[in-house]
Image: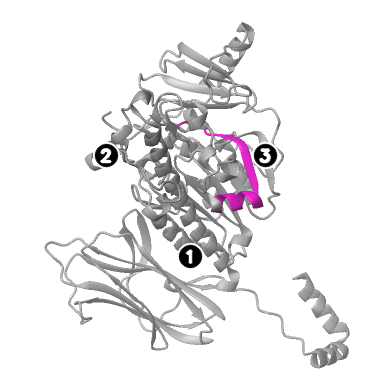
Amino acid sequence: MASRKLLNRRLAFFPTIVLLGGISLGCPSAAPPPSAPRSLLALKSDGPRSQVDLVTIGDERRESLLASQSWTLTFPRRALLTFGVAARYDGEGDIPGWARFVVSLDGREISNVTVNPRVTQDWRDVSVPLDSPPRQGVLRVDIRFTDKDGRDLPRPPGLHLAFADPVIHDRAAYGSKRGVILISIDTLRRDHVGAYGYGKPTTPVLDALGVSGLVADDAVSVSSWTLPSHLSMLTSVLPGAHGGTDMKQAFNRSVPSVAEILQARGVATHAVTSHLYVSRTYGLDAGFDSMNFRQDRLAENVANHAMDLVDRFGDRPFLIFLHFYDPHWHYAPPADVLKLFETSYAGKLTGNLKDFQNLRPDQVSAADLDHLRALYDGEIRYTDNQIGRLVGHLKERGVLRNTLMVVTSDHGEEFLEHGSWEHQKTLYEEVIRVPLMVAGPGVTPRRETQPTSLLDIAPTILDFLSVAPAPSMKGLSLLKPVPERREMYGETDHTLDGSRLSFLRGGAASWKAILRTDPGKRDERSSQWFDLARDPGEKENRPPAEALRASIEARAKDLALKSRSTAAGRPVELSSEQKEKLRALGYIGR
């Protein structure tokens, strides 16, 4: 803008010289600024306006065109058309045809999407690049119900055909605004990531992000299971404050989430998630314009949805939250990925939790344990590959240059290090120490050795977008220097005996206390003490001197009490279908 103003001043004072210079040098005219995205549903249409209504498919409600329509439009030089399509049948009996959504430009077909209304589906998002379109042209959408040969059929009662959110974008505008992609890879252990020294090829994409950004060497979670960890990640408060401490309790909405803060400022906020604990059922949709949840979806599906979101919102400020579930049990990576970590196994164990969850250490051979770790590593690599597809798409669209990438996990996983499997029930380092990487414009590449936490994620995102954190937030922005002395606290109520476990930790080269208390009376039942500098594997319980022990216990109890919200909890009543899914995953009935 400043250079254009200067040019105008020069033209005013030296018109002859500038004009002659322009002719002799052949100066090109300045490129026009990128145009803003335009919703076709808000523009004047050709002829009478067709019916537009809000249509709900799955968890998403979108403004949709319900019948054919055309518009006479002007197009940017490099345009991109995005839209969603869906078909829903609420009628009785079988339905004989297919939904067809045909888009044409000046009579030439540029997109043709067929949807089977007999199959329950998400919105199907479509992106259509328009390279060198006419300066002005007629864009037409035809919404049809046809037989298999494309002949039109009468629409039966209860059939809904929806063409949602059609928008014309200028591809020159992608990456012009700051955006954030927050990636949570469920159950990802820190020590199975290459950037943290793991020798197997699990995470080449994440490792590359780490080289270009910040790698937090000593990041910890606030819990050892999914619900409290993700709510703390999004709110920057401890589990007791947000209320999601038990599978029967959802987010109490007593504090704002990062999505709510950004949504109020006009930022596009969207999420794609893969577990019931990270869904509307438990209140994690707070502040998100949309949260597309499907239980146990594969990483490829998450990445596909993420790329669609980038196309839809990459030309405006955005927060996209992605929850990848694949490294969580059951472990079943694609065969071509598994062969990177295992070439043969003669045993009988599979990656299904029910196969191994009750096995004692003396019942598991070294080959069995290696096999399960190989399956787990394969799931990590498969997820990393899909994140790589997303990163490639961000580069292709020009969005990566102005996007903050935050990658972390909600907790780790146990492979008998302390005699048990999975997570939730303990607070040892293998479940609470997590990877945390931040990369993007303005992030100086560095290894952050001071203690950090999932509580730091929301303040970091807000800082990048120049938004002040909420007063309730307990974390710090990692875009600023991290204090040297920080104690980290976390807890879990998902224990075998119904007690509450909590930890207070001075850092990876310092002390750590794990306290077991009665959640009602808050009486301490037992405690464990570790010197992580000498004993990083937490094999030897070494209580400190009585005075130091009492001081640490008092601080841990104080944090546990002060973090409890005065807001009433929000009870969750799961449907029988939801309970059955959790039972199949091993969360209920064991």
Distance in Å between CA atoms under marks 1 and 3: 34 Å
Instruction: Label 1: state its secondary structure.
Output: helix
What is the three-letter code of the residue carrying label 1? Arg
Q: Which mark is residue 50?
A: none
CB under 8 Å between discs 2 and 3: no
Looking at the picture, how far across and down is residue 415, in whole percent? 42, 32
For the record, the magenta segment spans 205-224
Can you identify the residue that label 3 sits on? 448
Q: Earlier in the sequence, mark 2 or mark 1?
A: 1
Q: Which of 56 and 363 is in front in this view?
A: 363
Looking at the image, is 235 positioned above or below residue 301? above
Distance in Å between CA atoms under marks 2 and 1: 35 Å
Give the class, few, some or many, for how many residues have Cα within 10 Å of label 1's Cα (few <14, many ≥20): many
Q: Can you say which quadrant of the picture contains the C terminus? A: top left
Q: Can you say which quadrant of the picture contains the N terminus? A: bottom right
Q: Which residue is rendered at x = 65% and y = 74% of the image? A: 33
Looking at this rendering, what residue extends furthest in the top direction? 546
For this view, does 424 lie left or right of residue 584? Answer: right
Looking at the picture, how far across and down is residue 552, in whole percent? 60, 16
Q: Residue 584 carries which label?
A: 2
What is the three-letter code of the residue carrying label 3? Glu
Instruction: Label 3: state its secondary structure.
Output: strand
Looking at the picture, how far across and down is residue 203, in whole percent? 52, 49
